[in-house]
Amino acid sequence: MKKSRKTDGQPVDDLQLLRDLILGEEKDRLHKLDLRVSDLESRTSDVAEVLPAAMNRLVGDPASKPDFERPVVESIRGAIKRDTESFAEALFPVLGPAIRRAIADALSGLVQRINAALEHSFTIKGLKWRLEAARTGVPFPQIVLRHTMLYAVQEAFLIQRGSGLILASVHRDELLALDEDAVAAMLTAIQSFIQDSFGMAADEPLRSAELGERTVWVINGPAAALACVISGSPPRAVRAELMVLLETLHARYGNRLSEKPEGLSGDEGLRALMGEALREEVDASVRSSTSFKYKFLWIMGGLLLLGFLGYASINAWRDQQLSRQVVDLFQAEPGFVITAAEMDDGILNISGLRDPQAVPVAALLDSQQIPAGKVKTDFSPYQSLDREVIIQRLQRRFSLDPITTFNLEGDELTVSGTLTSGQFAGLQSLPDSHALIRSVNLDGARLNAEEASRVFREALDAPDSVSFQPAGAQMAVSGLADGSWFTAAREVAIEVPGWQLDFMPLQQNLSAQLNDLIENLNGRVFQYVFETRLTPESAASLDVAGSELVTAQDLASALGAHLNVTLEGSADGTGSRERNIEVSLSRSRHLLEELVARGMTEQGVTQTLAGWNESGIEPERRKVTLFIERSANP
């Protein structure tokens, strides 16, 4: 059985051996290829080796370039939509300088036009140009450009060959822009007319045309033509530059220039390239001829600007000083609270609080010579607790005279000056009703003179002949009064705020009255008819003399003086000596009794005898002589 099985498998092994000999090398190559295709890393390396060469070939082939660009553009567009921020960060270093350059170029052209207009605005030539602008209806800047520029490309059109459609257009001034379709139709019509009229071939296109003061240059290319509307006389070099621009457009957009215009309508890159066609060149001689005027105008403008800024700065500084002065003034004045202060067109608007007792606003501003028209105030009333305002409020409440003053220290009010009795009572009750004042010091205050005089008169029951007159801090008592009232008045204690009674004037008057009485009574003679019978004249004067003696004694007692009264009796010498002495003594005694009967006291009265002439009878010596003198009490 074994032998048979070995014999049967022998052909199989030989066949396999034959296959290995014939296909073994090819089999190994296929195996290696299978491994390489299956391995992702190997395939990536292979693609990386051939991709740069493939990319270069696609970029260099205009036929396949659009097919290559389309998926790349779509991929980039999708990526931008998905992650806008990352692309913005990546493109920022490129877009920033490009945007700044575009803005700088635009501003440079704008400044150049403004400078040209300013240079000729105030010159004779400029006035002529203004008249021309008014006559023709052309804007003044365009007139300036017309006379100062050597040339300027006003508009540029990219026209599709064959169809004559406008692919793109740019213009310098919106007001002077031509109708795109009209320009394209005009150029196509002119081209057809020239070819039909002069038998020109189709490959000999129109190169230029004159349209009034403008020139139209047509730069022809394979797929599109660049038509430029030019003012002035451009040099031939400009045409070459425009040709280079057209070639750039063909190189970048190629077959897209043969497509419908709608495909290029939103292409910003195409518009940017077309903007390079708007070239210009200013006449250097005109610029140099007006450079001095230009500098002069700039200098004058600068001086005017500096003057304006200086004037504005000075006004701002004055407004600031006024605001500070007024605010400080109100803040320093009691009874004012400033909450807001704003300058508005040279007027200082102040708002806050003001106590009705505070100084009037107009008077306060006038005290500092601040014009009232420069300040507008809006104060709401409130009750201030400032010391000065409280004092002013009290002065107005009690209607004080100017010499009466208040001084508030802490919670104690000190009053100095003259007050009425009602004011005294009101101030004494003030601590019970005032929120700040707890005590009132009236030691320096006194009752006014009129009320004080009335109080003294009523308390002393003074006669009408006595007057009370203020003399400094004292109430002087003067006039005439009897001694008993004078004595009693000096014993009465009367307290009148701020006043002391001064009896010295009255005392001096009474002393003078006493002296007058003494002078009047001293040496008075009382004549007798016989024995102790007075003559009618002397009897009539006896009542007056008695009254005067009583008054004199009363005054002397009140003044602390002593009166020495001497009654000197005399006789006429009839009879003996003894008889004359007896008669003289009886007469003096008689007069003393008569005077005592009329109120005179015997204290201090002395009776004496006068001498007589013994050689004869003298009737005129029938008398009593009254002698009186004043002396101090022992």
Image (tube, helix red, strand yellow):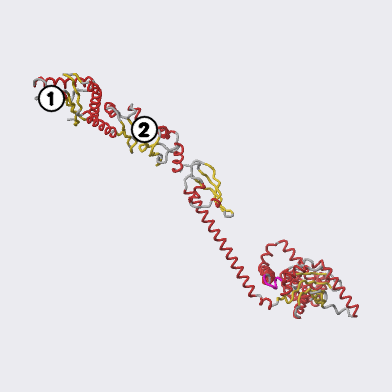
Q: Position of residue 407 (x, y in %)?
A: 40, 41
Please name the residue that numbered disc 2 is placed on: 452
Q: Mark 2, residues whose alpha carbon is within 10 Å: few (<14), some, or many (≥20)?
A: many
Q: Position of residue 376 (x, y in %)?
A: 56, 49
Q: Quadrant of residue 44?
A: bottom right
For residue 294, above or below residue 375:
below
Which span of residues is magenta-colored?
122-127
Q: Quadrant of the C terminus?
A: top left
**Amino acid, disc 1:** Leu
Task: Identify the main secondary structure in magenta.
Answer: helix
Q: Is residue 98 visible?
A: no
> Is residue 381 shown left or right of residue 557?
right
Could you say which disc has been placed on residue 609 in the image?
Answer: 1
**Residue sitting at 33 percent across and 37 percent down?**
471
Q: Is residue 426 visible?
A: yes
**Residue sitting at 41 percent across and 36 percent down?**
438
